[in-house]
Image: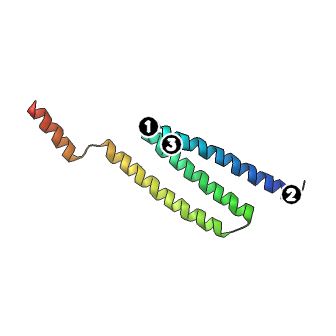
Amino acid sequence: MSLENAYTLLYSGALIYLAVLMAVMLVRSIRGPRITDRILAVNMISTMVITSIVILSRFLEENYLLDVGLIYVMISFVSILILCAVYIRRGRPGKKEENRKEERREHR
């Protein structure tokens, strides 16, 4: 077995392994049970996609794929920040909701 065949086998095995892990995380992001589990699963999927892009870059010997991976890292980071901000806002009731709750208590 030559060194090139060994690298081909290694890269192919790593990509298959990451694909299986991404499928498991996709199931986890759909089933939940909590929103935090879903956010973490989506974050892990994006991390595995980035890893796959880097492996493909080495396997295909195409350096521009590293630039694509860097752009995907930035997009993933911003999307996780947005998801966390939505989760935090959803957990805290706004002033309008607090006022409505107080009005309901007064009417009882």
Q: Which residue is mark 2?
A: 3
Q: What amino acid is labelled 3 in the image?
A: Ser
For the residues labelled 2 and 3, the Cα–Cα distance comes to 38 Å
Q: Earlier in the sequence, mark 1 or mark 2?
A: 2
* Residue 72 x %, y %: 55, 61
Horizontally, is 29 left or right of 6 in the view? left
Horizontally, is 22 left or right of 7 in the view? left
* Residue 3 x %, y %: 86, 57
Label number found at residue 29: 3
Q: Which residue is mark 1?
A: 34
The secondary element bearing badge 2 is classed as: helix
Residue 71, image quadrant: bottom right
Query: Which residue extends farthest left?
Result: 107
Looking at the image, do the residues carrying marks 2 and 3 touch, with CB atoms under 8 Å apart? no
Q: Mark 2, mark 3: which one is toward the viewer?
A: 3
Looking at the image, do the residues carrying marks 1 and 2 touch, with CB atoms under 8 Å apart? no
Count the marks: 3
Name the foreground residue: 77 vs 20.
20
Residue 68, image quadrant: bottom right
Q: What amino acid is labelled 1 in the image?
A: Arg
Scheme of image coloration:
rainbow
Q: Quadrant of the C terminus?
A: top left
The secondary element bearing badge 3 is classed as: helix
> Going 60% across and 68% down the picture, which residue do you hit?
67
Q: Earlier in the sequence, mark 2 or mark 3?
A: 2
> Going 13% across and 33% down the picture, which residue do you hit?
105
* Residue 55 x %, y %: 69, 58
For the residues labelled 1 and 2, the Cα–Cα distance comes to 46 Å
Q: Earlier in the sequence, mark 1 or mark 3?
A: 3
> Going 74% across and 61% down the picture, which residue do you hit?
59
